[in-house]
Amino acid sequence: MSKFLTDVELDQKIRRLSTDSIGRCPDPEDFGIDRKSFPRITEEKNFIDGIAESIVALTLVLFTVGGCAYSGLIDSDYSVVDCLRSTFLSTLIAFVISVTLKAYSKSHYINLDRYQEASNSHEQSYQEFKDNYLLGLKEHWETLDGHQFEQEVAKLFRLAGMSVSSTPRSGDYGVDLVIRSGNKTIICQCKAHKNPVGPAVVRDLYGALHHFNAESAMLISLSGFTKGVYEFVSGKPIELLGLDELIVMYHDVSQDPRFHHRSGHQLDLWGDVK
């Protein structure tokens, strides 16, 4: 795998976390719209709105044609007055049809409009929640030096119920942590660099798989990875974790009741308890 979480999985996890703060995402049935009928109703409304917009475009074309005829740029057997009258009437008819269709769409699909407004508002609130949530935890991670970053990552995996051991500071083939989960061994390298990690690092990590007799490897970087890294790990047993994935993993672990103190306080990755 090339990533610990896909972008979709990451977004889904944060959405679940946001429910307590901003509520759940609006449902069509909250607005009297049957879920099975929702796609059809949406398609109908989009079709009517599309026709109305097309008529608006046609209106502009009619204005243009009328103007060109008036300027003598288009040959016409009509007089200038006839040309302008015809253009005005055609434009007026098109405008009336467009307004009528829009009015019909607004009145007939009022519940759908309300649902879409609520959904758009909720999405905006979610994006604000996501930005603030990620920013708050990012500030902690970004203050860590290399050794501190390695220690925090080890603590995170231990909280997740895995066995974690650190390698010697030298002669470790670039590997910082050895993680064991069941019968599986995972070697891990942690990078707190300010710049994205390049392919040389992941190539060394791949070579260390055999030395440690590990099933897979994990490269964790605070600043992400270059395109060459993603290309190299394709098809290889190497997972890439960025800062966002670490944050969501932390929250998943700290929310798990198996890792709560008996007092009910929640384990804090950075300290003792929350």
Image (cartoon, grey):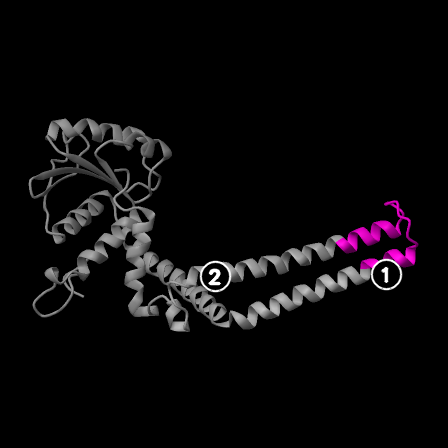
State the quadrant of the C terminus: bottom left
**Image check: 190 left or right of 15?**
left
Q: Name the spot of residue 127 as percent of width and height, x first.
A: 40, 60
Q: Name the spot of residue 179 as percent of width and height, x first.
A: 12, 41
Q: Front-most of 266 and 35?
A: 35
Do the residues under discs 1 and 2 have CB atoms within 8 angstroms?
A: no
Part of the protein shown in magenta: 62-87
Kindly identify which residue carries mark 2: 42
Label 1, label 2: how far apart the Cα atoms are: 38 Å
- The disc labelled 2 sits on which kind of residue? Thr
Q: Is residue 83 above or below residue 203?
A: below
Q: Badge 2: few (under 14), some or many (20 or more) residues near its Cα, within 10 Å? A: few
**Image check: 194 left or right of 266?**
right
Q: Front-most of 10 and 29?
A: 29
* Residue drawn at x 41%, y 72% as measured from the top left: 31
* Residue drawn at x 22%, y 55% as measured from the top left: 250
* Residue drawn at x 88%, y 52% as measured from the top left: 70
Q: Badge 1: few (under 14), some or many (20 or more) residues near its Cα, within 10 Å? A: few
Q: Which quarter of the picture shows residue 26?
A: bottom left
Q: Name the spot of residue 28 as percent of width and height, x first.
A: 40, 67
Does the segment drawn in magenta span residue 47? Answer: no
Does the segment drawn in magenta span residue 79? Answer: yes
Q: Name the spot of residue 218 as percent of width and height, x first.
A: 21, 38
Q: Front-most of 30 and 6?
A: 30
Q: Secondary structure at mark 2?
A: helix
Q: Which quarter of the picture shows residue 93?
A: bottom right
Kindly identify which residue carries mark 1: 85
State the quadrant of the N terminus: top left
Tell me if residue 142 can be seen: no
